[in-house]
Amino acid sequence: MPIIRKLYPVLAFLTVFAALVSFPQSASAQSCTTTVTAVSFGNADVTAATPTDTTAELKVSCSGYAAGATLLACPALGAGSGGVVAGRRAMPRLSGSETLAFELYSDGGRAQVWGSTDVPPQTIAISPSGSGEATATIFARVFGGQSTVPVGSYSSTFSGSDVNIRYGLQTGSETCASTLTGTTTASFTVTATVTPQCTLTTSDINFGNVGALSNPVTASGTVTVRCTSNAGYTISMDGGNAKSDDPTKRWMGGTTPQTGVSYGLYQNSQYSLPWGNTPGLTKADIGSGSNQTFTVYGRTNPSTITPPADTYNDTVIVTVTY
């Protein structure tokens, strides 16, 4: 007879173990970085006695330190790519060899120059997240009274060698004269544009006391212009109170209507080049940064009729266009 065998399943259990090993995490590196915004003066009027001022921001950001720690940062600023000229930092002109004097300060009164040794200490408090930052204002000034500096664009670059920040933990009485092992650098630019500016003064023309006008009477005055160096300009004169279209036939009026003295204004002593306000009759020149004085030659037009005794005068508007 057949043999019947029962099959019994054999069960095997495989146990899988996963071992989780905890490794200590490495602490974040302790470091600081620095950023400096650009120092932009915009348009600077160097003919004025008053300076042109602006500000920038220097920020030191630190991370990886223990919460509650305090750091001392000492940012030093060098001379910049323009160097120092006559005791002041200088911005070279981009298209020339001239320089524009400026300075960087650590105080709003602009008394303390921010240099490589005279640096304002910055205290950085570390937050619970392990980071902290300090922000300082750079007070900048372009000096007035630099009228001989030519019109143009000026720039000085402060590279990593000019912006050096030393930093370290403050555990006691550390100062910026102490040894601080951490260092970081930054870079920024200083820019300014010297724009054309002019001032104008005049002296009167007085023909004096005249008994007869049958012959021309002459007198002279002056126009003094002071414009930024390298700035082109023109000087024009209007037609006076009578609004004369002919600069050789202006009119001095008196107290009696319809009576007066005809005269002309000229650019030369030969009385051959009238001075007016139309093309060809204005005077053009280029500023030097110093006073430039021009003589205005006046001459009365001869007349067979001398007006009644009186005081005659006219007002001519002189305009400098630059």
Image (cartoon, grey):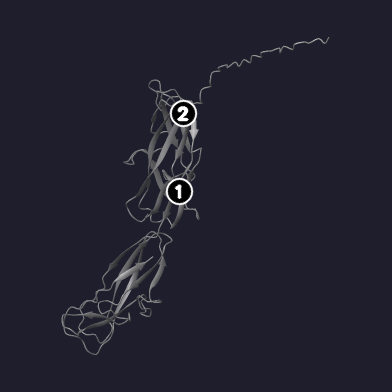
Q: In the structure shown, which secondary structural element does the residue marked by tag 2 occupy?
A: strand
Between 299 and 40, the one nearer to me in the picture: 40
What numbered label is drawn on residue 99?
none
Q: In the structure shown, which secondary structural element does the residue marked by tag 1 occupy?
A: strand
Please provide percent x and percent y for residue 262: 26, 83
Q: Decide if residue 216 is on the left or right side of residue 67.
A: left
Q: Badge 1 is on which residue?
A: 91
Mark whose residue sits in front, 1 or 2: 2
Disc with the residue nearer the chain's start (1 vs 2): 2
Please provide percent x and percent y for residue 4: 78, 11
Residue pictured at 46% horizontal, 28% vertical: 63
Q: Amino acid at mark 1?
A: Met
Please provide percent x and percent y for residue 205: 26, 73
Q: Amino acid at mark 2?
A: Ser
Q: Badge 2 is on which residue?
A: 63
Residue pictured at 44% horizontal, 40% vertical: 36
Can you name the residue that lies furthest to the front here?
1
Question: Where 178 sits versus 5, above or below?
Answer: below
